[in-house]
Amino acid sequence: MSHAAPAHKRILLKLSGEALMGDDSFGINRATIVRMVEEIAEVTRLGVQVAVVIGGGNIFRGVAGGSVGMDRATADYMGMLATVMNALALADAMDKQGLVARVMSAIAIEQVVEPYVRPKALQYLEEGKVVVFAAGTGNPFFTTDTAAALRGAEIGAELVLKATKVDGVYTADPQKDPSATRYTKLSFDEAMSRNLGIMDATAFALCRDQKLPVKVFSIIKHGALKRVVMGEDEGTLVYA
Ligand code: UDP
């Protein structure tokens, strides 16, 4: 048994909607959520404060056809509402698995979830509750990656963890090119000049300006989240 302390005290975990889908083509896969919550529970037991920004792509995919030709801002508000559904599902699974979770929405829907209030979010984190940030930034034309950068900076997270299906950033697509190697770390400038497409440009610029490092890691690989939190060689670190 290891007695090492975690390398980070407060983290912001960005989960895309796709992460909740499992192998389904859209929607929420319960078993996938349960597994993910187990990984999150493990790091909270280490005393790490965890905030989550959840995406909405998995739900939006189911209605994307209907949004063709739609006003962009309207479609984006639908996308933000999709993240609220995911947040509710995630928080429910957390409660069932013994974590105390609080959902905070960037869009006022107070009958459903409480609004985002920064001091309250900080208080919950100090109390060891997992805070799930829903509805992105609350503004159209942004992404939940940008919400992750924004909330990460606001709550003073030491690290933004971007969960993907691949265990880091590779020199080429590892599924197509077996000689591709994983970057252990690289600077924001390197990532931008190599066009690695880790996050959208707005999210990236915000993290770089705020010197908020981003770790790209696999949410599927068992124990990877814990390894990241323990500061072990897992995923890819993008640093300022
Ligand atoms: N969205 C938005 N503003 C935000 C965050 C999200 O308008 O601040 C909308 C946008 O339409 C986006 C959708 O919500 O496509 C779902 O978010 P995202 O694509 O980031 O989810 P993910 O791909 O991570 O599942």
Image (cartoon, rainbow, N blue to C red):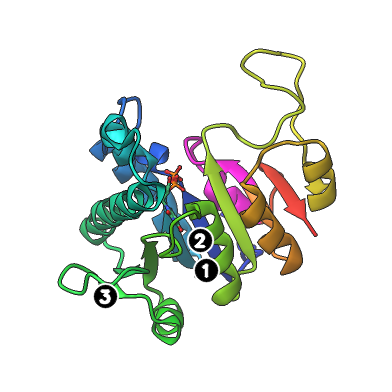
Query: SS of the residue at dot 2?
Result: helix
Quarter residue 97 falls in? bottom left
Q: Is residue 220 left or right of residue 27?
A: right
Kind of residue at badge 2: Ala
Q: Nearer the viewer, residue 79 or 154?
A: 79
Above or below residue 196? Residue 154 is below
What residue did someone put label 3 on? 114
Q: Residue at x 77, y 15 (%)?
A: 179
Kind of residue at badge 3: Glu
Query: SS of the residue at dot 3?
Result: strand
Residue at mark 3 to residue at mark 2: CA–CA distance = 17 Å
Q: Nearer the viewer, residue 221 or 61?
A: 61
Above or below residue 172? Residue 163 is below
Q: Is residue 38 left or right of residue 113?
A: right
The circle on residue 151 is 1
Crowding at dot 1, Cα within 10 Å, few <14 / some 14-19 / many 20+, comes out as many
Q: Is residue 181 a member of the stretch shown in magenta?
A: no
Q: Residue at x 18, y 67 (%)?
A: 112
Quarter residue 5 falls in? bottom right
Residue at mark 3 to residue at mark 1: CA–CA distance = 16 Å
Highlighted range, magenta: 216-230
Above or below residue 9? Residue 197 is above
What residue did someone put label 2 on? 147
Query: SS of the residue at dot 1?
Result: helix
Q: Are marks 1 and 2 in contact (CB under 8 Å)?
A: yes
Across and down, in percent, residue 67 comes to 31, 37
